[in-house]
Amino acid sequence: MDFLQREVLTAALQEQSVAMAVAMAVFVTGKNVASPWGIATGMADASTGRPLTIDTPLRVASNTKTFVAATVLRLWEQGAIVLDAPIAPLLTPALERLLTSRGYLTDKITVRHLLSHSAGVFDHADDPRYFKAVLANPTHHWTREEQVGLSCLYDGPTNEPGREYIYSDTGYVLLGDVVERVTQAPLAQSVRHQLRFDERGLSSTWWEMVESQPAGTQARARQFLDDAAVTDVTDVSATLDLYGGGGLVMSVRDLATFQQDLFEHRVFDNPATLAEMLRQGDHEGAEEYRLGMSAKRIGGRECFSHTGYWGTAVYYSPDAGVSIAGFTTHRAGRPALVALLEGAMGAAGEGADG
């Protein structure tokens, strides 16, 4: 069954949306897609009867990591960052002191280690104490230093630098600091400038709290955490995830379009930069994650992807020349959405012209 045929993907999306009682949207584009297209079902805001569309922005959480990694690689190709340089002199001194006081070898951890999640930095965001604190005080303004401090409070190094892949939001919080120190500009401004958001027409994309919402952009969809009960997390302070591990708000159209631009050589100046981004490291688990991008084979094809905590995901198959992104407004709907997208990528070769 070809999930990239419009009518088939529409039916599958609607079926999942109804079964899960969640809103979902998908956008398909790429060099082998004759006409980019998307579909959406369900409500962006049920209280006002506002439907979800392919241009409705959501918080994309960890999908932001790909944008931060691409910014670092843009700076690398310009000679402003050395990927294998230690982070000690690059970090804000207060952050560097926190890390060294907890036993981190900041003279051994490199920028590449942070990008590939092989630095051994304990992930504050994955510790249940952090999310409990966030929900207990949803308006609290978290700082970068607080988050790195919590990582150091919760635990120390998970392994020696460069030893193994262990996902870490804290590592990307540190990368956000590195970008700001190197560019002498706020992270949001640096990412927008280096990745040329405005030139590539990402009109429904902005960094929450520190950038103004673009004129004419739809209101954000309401987003929900489904655990013991359904919790509306739309208005939880964006600072819980703002400093590089997350922070971007965007539409499913914009996410799929950027993934396409990245893999079709419209982001970096030198094609070798994308090759460096996707090159597999030699640490344990390196086959799972490169520099800001997950990697796996789907239907016999190599695909590169990233997901976001609240319910977002994007994939690109270089072989098929197809980019596909999906959003759901409920965290509990993400596994079904990912299964749908991976089914689509597995069928991508036959129906790219949908």
Image (tube, rainbow, N blue to C red):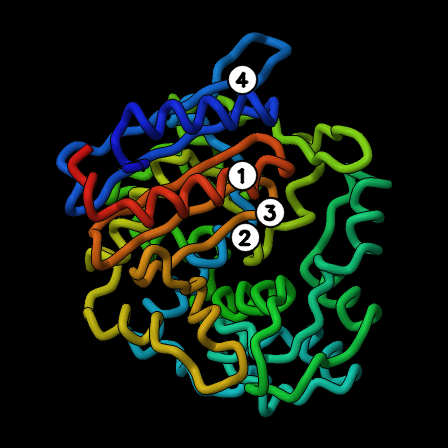
Task: Tell me, yes or no, if residue 7 can be seen here.
Answer: yes
The span from disc 4 to disc 1 (Cα, nearest Å) is: 18 Å
User: Label 1 crowding class (10 Å Cα cut-off): few <14, some 14-19, many 20+?
Assistant: some
Which label number is shown at residue 336? 1
Discs 2, 4 touching: Cβ within 8 Å: no
Q: Is residue 182 above or below residue 70?
A: below
Between 178 and 281, the one lying in front of the other is 281
Of circles 1 and 2, the one toward us is 1
Instruction: Please name the residue that numbered disc 2 is placed on.
Output: 62
User: Label 3 crowding class (10 Å Cα cut-off): few <14, some 14-19, many 20+?
Assistant: some
Instruction: Please name the residue that numbered disc 3 is placed on.
Output: 309
Residue type, numbered disc 3: Tyr
Residue type, numbered disc 4: Met
Residue type, numbered disc 2: Ser
Q: Is residue 225 above or below residue 130?
A: above
| Mark sitting earlier along the chain (2/3) | 2
Quarter of the rendering occupied by the C terminus: top left
Mark 1 falls on what kind of element?
Answer: helix
| Mark sitting earlier along the chain (2/4) | 4
Residue type, numbered disc 1: Ala
